[in-house]
Amino acid sequence: MKIACVAAGLFSFAFFLHWIVWRIKIPSRQTAALLLILLGVLPVGLVAIGVLPRLQSFAPVGFWEYLHVSIFHVAMSLAYVVAYSALEQRSPSMTVLVFVAASRRQGRTREELVDLLKGMLPVEARLDAMLRDGMLADVNDIYQLTAKGRLWDYCFAAWRRLTKLSKGG
């Protein structure tokens, strides 16, 4: 139970640190900043637990306990980065809910909702995010994978082969 609490505590601290940084200023390269914060907390946190007298009773003991904490933290961090990229842009459904909720009891007409959704271009927002994060490059109006994009493609392709999933979105 101690190891589960340490692992959850480290990830919670990393999430809290991410939240604080985003409240101050959202980084221009959000995915890189998220990975740096989330994965950077693991070694710093493990050292702090081993060095600070008040936390030493929580310190993992031996290779396997450190491995368990590390696997949990890395898995949670990567899962959060993937989820964050999906939540980075507001979905059309969430936009409609927020828009209708903002009207209080008045509600919104169908025309208002259609006009609201006409202005949303989720694919364009996703392309902009991939350009910003350096996964794609716009070369004379042709989108090409960067080295980072090729690495992600390789990872996704390897995962599809491993899990025997078909190609798709």
Image: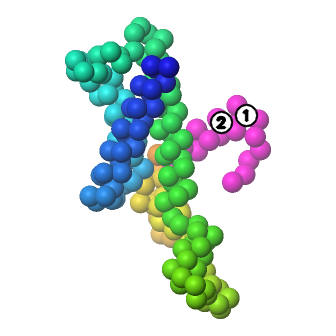
Residue 36 at least partly seen: no
Res 97 → quadrant: bottom right
Mark 2 — residue?
Answer: 159
Q: Report whether 30 appears left or right of 4.
A: left
Q: Does residue 135 show up magenta in the picture? A: no
Tell me where residue 83 appears, x and y as whole percent. 54, 50
Q: Residue furthest front?
A: 105
In the foreground, 73 or 156: 73
Q: Position of residue 49 (x, y in %)?
A: 30, 21
- How far from the left and from the top, in percent, is residue 151? 52, 41
Q: Residue at x 53, y 58 (%)?
A: 87
Relative to 124, is 35 above or below? above
Q: Position of residue 34 (x, y in %)?
A: 39, 46
Q: Quadrant of residue 94?
A: bottom right
Q: Which residue is mark 1?
A: 163
SS type, badge 2:
helix
User: Main SS of the magenta segment?
Assistant: helix
Please state which amino acid type lies under the numbered disc 2.
Trp
Whether tag 1 and tag 2 are in contact, CB under 8 A, the answer is yes
The one nearer the camera, 69 or 2, is: 2
Magenta part of the protein: which range? 149-169
In percent of the image, x 58 and y 88: which residue is there? Answer: 106
For the point 45% across and 19% down, which residue is it? 2
> How are the colours assigned in the image?
rainbow
Q: Secondary structure at mark 1?
A: helix
